[in-house]
Image (cartoon, helix red, strand yellow):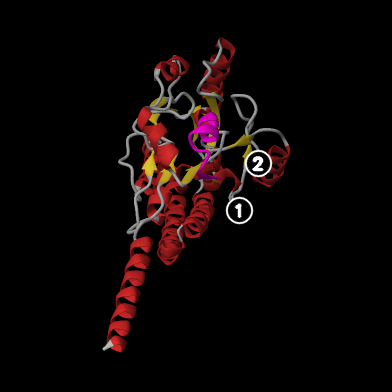
């Protein structure tokens, strides 16, 4: 009888241990993502395990955003915080040192395999023939400040996703297999998206255009698009009269077919630079301000950008 009791006790203990392990595996860490493209990649990796919290929602801009009380609570309780880095989310620099001090911060700008370009100088960019592009890119990389809009190249998004998988698997070993499987599926989808966009954008590669701010260098370079310039290099600063005059001249001289505004900023500057030109106005949304957050948001964002470019640049061709 005592032996039976001992066996029963061992069985109960084993059941408790197994149940505890299952509960641990089913209880993912609290995760925060800064902007919608990052949140989308994190959500895809966490699919079926948990849901990350998104800080910037709707039409908010990381250049001007102020934390809400709910954001502060999310940061304070987070175990993992994914962001691009202080080059983009300047509003997070101080809160991460205070509210998020207990969390592991993963700056995806530093992820292994991410290609980084330097910011471009001036608002009007010179045109270069194909053989000089690699040399110009290398020269930009040797100079100064980094262009942090890395997610606008699907190859960078793939490297970011790999870093997200690694960080989650380390923080939550019980669900590591799920993160890795999700990461593999996400990588395949990003490869397919890259091929799709390359094909869709091929008809408008030679058509010049102007953007609101210099956020699209990675997208332009990946798909060999012909951007002529940007109204502003820093959307937090209003461009002066000289810049507006230079951009208007570039639209005329280069024959820019479209000027692209952004939903986060007032379109008045776009209307100003288009005065007296034949350019059309359209919208590019590099942050997904008008897209429902979630695992598919990154793909919707990239497809909508391509569709907006094709729709405007092919018009009247």
Q: Which of 83 and 201 is in front in this view?
A: 83
Q: Position of residue 300 (x, y in %)?
A: 35, 45
Residue 223 shows up from this direction: yes
Task: Judge whether 279 appears above or below 198 on screen.
Answer: above
Q: Could you tell me how far apart the alpha carbons at marks 2 and 1 are, in whole angstroms?
A: 30 Å
Part of the protein shown in magenta:
93-106
Residue beneath the point at 55% across and 31% down: 93
Lateral position of residue 177 relative to residue 84, left or right:
left
Q: Kindly indicate the quadrant of the structure image that contains residue 277.
A: top left
Q: Quadrant of residue 193?
A: bottom left
- The residue at 53%/26% (across/down) is 230
Instruction: Tell me if 205 is positioned left or right of 130 in this view.
Output: left
Residue corresponding to mark 2: 129
The circle drawn on residue 112 is 1
Depth check, mark 2 against mark 1: the one in front is 1
Q: Does the magenta stretch include residue 103?
A: yes
């Amino acid at each position: 009888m005592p032996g039976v009791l001992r066996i029963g006790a061992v069985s109960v203990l084993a059941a408790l241990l197994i149940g505890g392990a299952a509960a641990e595996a089913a209880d993912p860490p609290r995760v925060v993502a800064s902007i919608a493209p990052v949140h989308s990649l994190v959500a895809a990796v966490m699919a079926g395990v948990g849901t990350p919290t998104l800080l910037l929602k709707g039409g908010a801009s990381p250049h001007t955003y102020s934390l809400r009380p709910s954001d502060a609570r999310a940061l304070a309780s987070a175990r993992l915080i994914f962001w691009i880095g202080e080059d983009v989310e300047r509003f997070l620099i101080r809160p991460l040192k205070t509210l998020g001090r207990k969390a592991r911060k993963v700056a995806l700008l530093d992820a292994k395999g991410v290609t980084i370009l330097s910011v471009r100088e001036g608002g009007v960019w010179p045109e270069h023939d194909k053989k000089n592009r690699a040399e110009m890119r290398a020269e930009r990389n040797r100079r100064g400040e980094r262009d942090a809009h890395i997610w606008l190249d699907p190859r960078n998004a793939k490297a970011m996703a790999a870093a997200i998988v690694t960080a989650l698997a380390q923080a939550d070993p019980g669900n590591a297999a799920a993160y890795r499987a999700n990461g593999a599926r996400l990588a395949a989808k990003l490869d397919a998206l890259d091929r799709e966009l390359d094909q869709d954008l091929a008809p408008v590669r030679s058509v010049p255009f102007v953007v609101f701010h210099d956020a699209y260098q990675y997208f332009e370079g990946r798909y060999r698009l012909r951007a002529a310039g940007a109204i502003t290099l820093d959307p937090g600063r209003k461009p002066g009269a000289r810049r507006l005059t230079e951009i208007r001249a570039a639209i005329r001289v280069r024959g820019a077919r479209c000027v692209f505004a952004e939903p986060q900023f007032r379109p008045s500057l776009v209307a100003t630079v288009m005065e007296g030109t034949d350019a059309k106005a359209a919208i590019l949304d590099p942050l997904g301000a008008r897209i429902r957050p979630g695992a598919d948001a990154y793909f919707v964002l990239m497809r909508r950008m391509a569709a907006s470019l094709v729709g405007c640049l092919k018009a009247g061709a």
